[in-house]
Image (cartoon, rainbow, N blue to C red):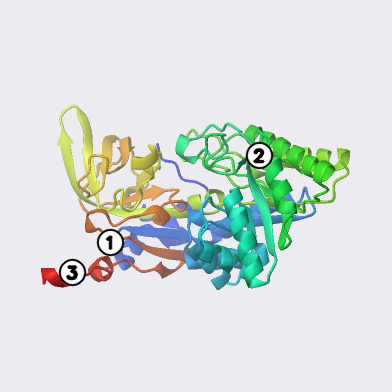
Amino acid sequence: MLMLKQHFGTNTRGHLVIGGADAVELAERFGTPLYVVDEQRVRENYRRFYRAFAERWPSVLVCYALKANFNLAICKILQGEGAGADVSSGNELRNALGVGIPGNRVVFNGNYKTLSELELAIINDVMINVDSLQELDAIEGLTSRLGKRARIGLRVNPNVKTPTHPYIATGLRESKFGFDVASGQAFEAYKSASRMRNVEVVGIHSHIGSQILDAGPFEEEAEKLMALVAEVKERLNIHLQSVDLGGGIGIPYKPDDPELQPEEVAEHIISVVKRVVEEKNLARLTLVLEPGRYIIADASVLLARVGYTKERPGMPTWVAVDAGMNALIRPALYGAYHHIELANKIREKNEQLVNIAGPLCESGDFLGKERRLPAAEPGDLAAIFDVGAYGLAMSSQHTAQPRPAMVLVNRGKAEIIRKRESYEDLTHLDQIPGWLK
């Protein structure tokens, strides 16, 4: 079935329109495979998310999760909207700082931050969400050497089950992330941190998973975090300034997927926060959220050129396109669904049962199986939707395939924001040892 979200359109030529631009013309101008990002959709998604929380709570910081898509132009758009940044590597931190996001509006997450990454964060007044006691000790050592204080939160693991893929469920006790709440480990970590001279304990952080389409787990997360906020105040006299609930709000990838509204999530979370703040007489807290997928996923499409088709009697026709798991690994890695249409035949009936395959020498190299499309022919243009999050960010050079280009569209204008890789890009870091020459 044809599934176009409201920010897409069609024109009189029967072509898909993205951000006011004809998808077929974009492919002809910039080549394929091609990621296309709609700037206005990115802005709309951020604004809606921010409003959902800011209209219900007086102090809110929305930190865009760069791991979803760390392209500099995307980061710059969100910096212009006033977003903070959620980073999980030193290079993501450099991206955030490089586009003008102040360090005090950046949160640094992850279970293994190197000493050089921690130093960069401390120097720039970044909030470091500490993930282990050894990391806490490392931070204390760095602050003594640098003569600077470090602002930290503790990432805690609240053991919240979420209806999502196991690889992206991060709030269970068996997960690698955070201090365990149930055993008291998280409380003891706060006690240790409170004794450190150059460490300022200001926050609490949790992230329970990704692609969540039910508000219930977020409410449970808020309950468990706020209980710990109250406990560290009562027993340790630590008055936390911020509660960071991470990201995780999903989007509808399939035509029949429910849509979780950010307003619903905000209602569930803020009702808990408000109640505990009032009951326990807590200082007003800043709510920190870390959306990535919600902001960027549905703002982007991957365009891929059909090369060959292959019929198999009694089975779906194979349609081979020039983008595969090298360009978009989510279908192969997670069994994830991405909706697919033919951008040059957007108004034609989807009557042919097909599998859409990439060009790699892997049986797992597919973008979609048992889909309905118009009769596909060489030269047609496939549009793979909702690819802005974890698309190009997780791409590879498998079978020496160059990574795709990325173009930004804005009310009909289009400009490259990431160049297509060349053969030279694939090999310029390689070296042949002298004994082989």
Residue drawn at x 50%, y 46% is 5
Q: Nearer the viewer, residue 98 or 239?
A: 239
Find the distance from the CA under tag 3 to the CA under tag 1. 21 Å
Tell me the SS state at disc 2.
Answer: helix
Name which of mark 2 and mark 3 comes first in the sequence. Answer: 2
Q: CB under 8 Å between callouts 2 and 3?
A: no
Q: Residues within 10 Å of mark 1 (few under 14, many from 20)?
A: many
Q: Which mark is residue 402?
A: 1
Q: Amino acid at mark 2?
A: Gln
Q: Residue 167: percent from the left, percent from the top?
A: 45, 39
Residue drawn at x 57%, y 70% is 97
Q: Nearer the viewer, residue 176 or 419?
A: 176
Q: Nearer the viewer, mark 2 or mark 1?
A: 2
Find the distance from the CA under tag 2 to the CA under tag 1. 46 Å
Q: Which residue is mark 3?
A: 432
Tell me the SS state at disc 1.
Answer: loop
Q: Which residue is mark 2?
A: 185
Tell me the SS state at disc 3.
Answer: loop
Q: Amino acid at mark 1?
A: Pro
